[in-house]
């Protein structure tokens, strides 16, 4: 299984700048409130400095103290009010931005080409939709606003220090080299460390999910010990990845705290000496020292949230990487050449098609096939021969690495997914019942269908009887938390969607495999009227499908070895005749 791509720093930075511009007004308003609140937060230290100056000059009076205490109280109340409004605005902005990013990510996931979804590790996609979304939520809702606010507060505090006494403020610079060096070193190793951590989570999630989903297979083949060992290896890798990032923090955080302590001590000593030399007032020394102490809080938040921003940046890169996966087909509305429908040519031509899931290991070897409009073609052959792969190429799910698959004069690879589904549809034995009503599930393929059209589609696939018997009929909730459909009913639902989609070519890959043979035969006969006039490519192991087909295509080792009618191939006495005899013996129970 492959991993979905991860966006690089430039892409993340570009997207972050675009978001900032999009929400510029709300962001500037929020920061303005925080700036005013920060200014009010500086008033108490300045008032204490004024009281100190008055005390050293023996000019302290009750009126002076009361007026300054009243000013301090008023500044505190204004600060509290501005902080409340600013924090509320930051939370609202964070929710809006996160909701936008989440919707964009889900849209990107839903727009992934089916071939990419199947190639991608389940754990990778699961990890991005859970762990990375959670990390991004914390970053956007809290880390980014808090970090920006801390930067504004730190800048305003530094400006206030310089305005009170530039000389005294110089002492606080002593810790800057230590902060810069330690932070640069941390950032150098942080991103790859957190990327490794996220990848380890994806691997662990994938192994656990695959083991749980295939529990019966694991038990049947006695693979429990192997899967347990894989999970232990994944847990060990996650442990070491987390230990690496923890070690980075253990080295960085104490260094930062030491730098803060050094700055306070240096400012207190330097400003005290300046006051003793009568170069600044005692009040100025007091105020500047209090500002340095006060500066520790926003600087500490800048540093601590910076670590959270690294995690968020890594998660954003993984989420934006999904958006970077593009279908090779053109987007809707692009010039795709001649429309097969307007050209009145629905002939499907497979020409010298080669396909490999892994480079150098071809599954199909130069397959060529012409399927006439309205023809019923059965594709048969032993397991692993390449039947389903050929069906996927005809349905446009995959494109051949060499050769082409065309409808009329139009290459399927040149059709957008929406345009492609108008012409060709694939139904496999894999199916899914979405959470919602039966009506909602049916309308996935035809949103404007009326209830009468839905019932006719159900009737066409022999599902009308059980659908009408549901507690609320079409309004019955189905899916994981609703009415539980049997596998056979779920497959009939998938076939009903196909009837509503109404494409001119249908590729049925074991579409009735979950039904018992008698029910499958009855369903296929019921579908016959619906499928009349359409091109049908049926991939099946039950050879009665081949018996009813116009032609039979026999695939073996990735090549078409026989092509003709059922009777012609039986008379030929080749691979199809052998398959037919074997299947008949199994069906009748003959030895």
Image (spheres, helix red, strand yellow):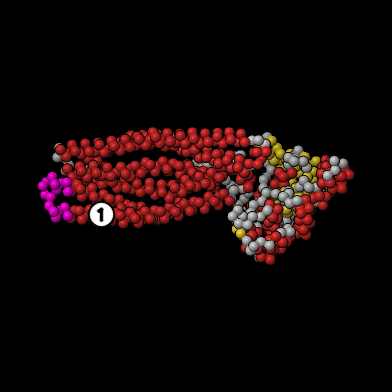
- Which residue appears farthest toward the left when viewing the image? 58
Tell me where residue 287 sits by quadrant.
Answer: top left
Vertical comparison of 383 with 478: above or below: above
Identity of the residue drawn at 62% across and 36% down: 224
Q: Which range of residues does the magenta coloring cover?
A: 51-66
| Label 1 Cα neighbours within 10 Å, binned few <14 / some 14-19 / many ≥20 | some
Q: Does the magenta segment cover residue 56?
A: yes
Left or right of 63 on screen, residue 103: right
Is 216 in front, or is 412?
Answer: 216
The quarter of the rendered structure image containing the N terminus is: top right
Q: Is residue 249 above or below residue 508?
A: above
What's the residue at 43%, 36% (across, down)? Answer: 246
SS assignment at label 1: helix
- Answer yes or no: is residue 444 visible: no
Q: Residue at x 40, y 42 (%)?
A: 306
- Which residue corresponds to mark 1? 75
Residue 54 pos. (x, y %): 14, 48
Side (left or right) of 215 relative to 159: right
Inspect the magenta stretch and tell me whether residue 118 lies in it: no
Magenta stretch: helix, strand or loop mostly: helix
Q: Residue at x 39, y 43 (%)?
A: 305
């Amino acid at each position: 299984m492959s991993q979905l791509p991860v966006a690089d720093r430039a892409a993340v930075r570009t997207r972050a700048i675009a978001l900032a511009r999009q929400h510029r007004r709300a962001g500037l308003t929020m920061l303005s409130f925080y700036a005013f609140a920060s200014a009010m937060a500086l008033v108490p230290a300045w008032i204490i400095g004024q009281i100190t100056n008055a005390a050293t000059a023996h000019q302290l009076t009750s009126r002076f103290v009361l007026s300054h205490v009243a000013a301090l109280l008023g500044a505190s109340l204004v600060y509290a009010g501005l902080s409340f409004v600013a924090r509320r605005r930051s939370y609202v902005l964070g929710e809006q931005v996160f909701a936008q990013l989440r919707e964009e990510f889900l849209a990107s996931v839903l727009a992934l080409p089916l071939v990419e979804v199947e190639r991608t590790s389940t754990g990778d996609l699961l990890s991005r939709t859970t762990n990375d979304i959670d990390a991004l939520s914390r970053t956007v809702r809290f880390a980014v606003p808090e970090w920006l606010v801390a930067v504004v507060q730190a800048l305003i505090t530094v400006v206030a220090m310089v305005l009170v006494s530039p000389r005294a403020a110089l002492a606080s610079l002593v810790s800057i080299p230590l902060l810069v060096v330690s932070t640069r070193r941390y950032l150098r190793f942080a991103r790859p460390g957190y990327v490794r951590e996220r990848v380890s989570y994806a691997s662990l999630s994938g192994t656990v999910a695959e083991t749980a989903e295939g529990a019966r297979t694991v038990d049947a083949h006695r693979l429990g010990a192997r899967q347990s060992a894989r999970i232990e290896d994944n847990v060990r890798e996650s442990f070491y990845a987390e230990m690496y990032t923890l070690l980075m923090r253990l080295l960085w955080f104490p260094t930062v705290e030491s730098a803060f302590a050094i700055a306070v001590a240096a400012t207190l000593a330097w400003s005290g000496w300046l006051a003793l030399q009568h170069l600044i007032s005692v009040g100025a020394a007091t105020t500047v020292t209090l500002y340095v102490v006060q500066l520790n809080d926003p600087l500490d938040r800048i540093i601590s949230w910076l670590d959270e921003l690294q995690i968020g940046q890594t998660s954003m890169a993984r989420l934006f990487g999904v958006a970077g996966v593009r279908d090779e087909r053109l987007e809707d509305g692009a010039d795709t050449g001649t429309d097969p429908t307007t050209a009145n040519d629905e002939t499907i031509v497979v020409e010298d098609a080669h396909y490999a899931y892994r480079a150098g290991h071809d599954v199909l070897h130069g397959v060529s096939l012409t399927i006439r409009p309205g023809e019923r073609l059965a594709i048969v052959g032993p397991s692993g021969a390449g039947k389903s792969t050929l069906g996927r190429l005809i349905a446009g799910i995959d494109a051949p690495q060499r050769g082409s698959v065309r409808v009329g004069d139009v290459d399927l690879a040149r059709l957008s997914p929406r345009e492609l589904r108008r012409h060709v549809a694939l139904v496999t034995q894999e199916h899914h019942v979405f959470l919602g009503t039966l009506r909602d599930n049916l309308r996935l393929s035809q949103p404007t269908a009326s209830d009468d059209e839905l019932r006719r589609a159900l009737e066409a696939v022999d599902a009308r009887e059980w659908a009408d018997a549901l507690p609320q009929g079409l309004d019955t909730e189905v899916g994981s938390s609703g009415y539980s459909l049997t596998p056979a009913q779920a497959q009939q639902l998938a076939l009903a969607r196909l009837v509503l989609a109404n494409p001119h070519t249908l590729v049925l890959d074991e579409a009735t495999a979950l039904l018992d043979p008698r029910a499958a035969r009855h369903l296929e006969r019921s579908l016959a009227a619906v499928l009349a006039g359409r091109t049908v490519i049926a991939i099946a192991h039950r050879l009665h499908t081949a018996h009813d087909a116009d032609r039979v295509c026999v695939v073996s080792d990735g090549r078409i070895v026989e092509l003709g009618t059922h009777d012609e191939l039986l008379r030929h006495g080749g691979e199809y005749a052998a398959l037919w005899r074997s299947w008949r013996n199994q069906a009748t129970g003959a030895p």
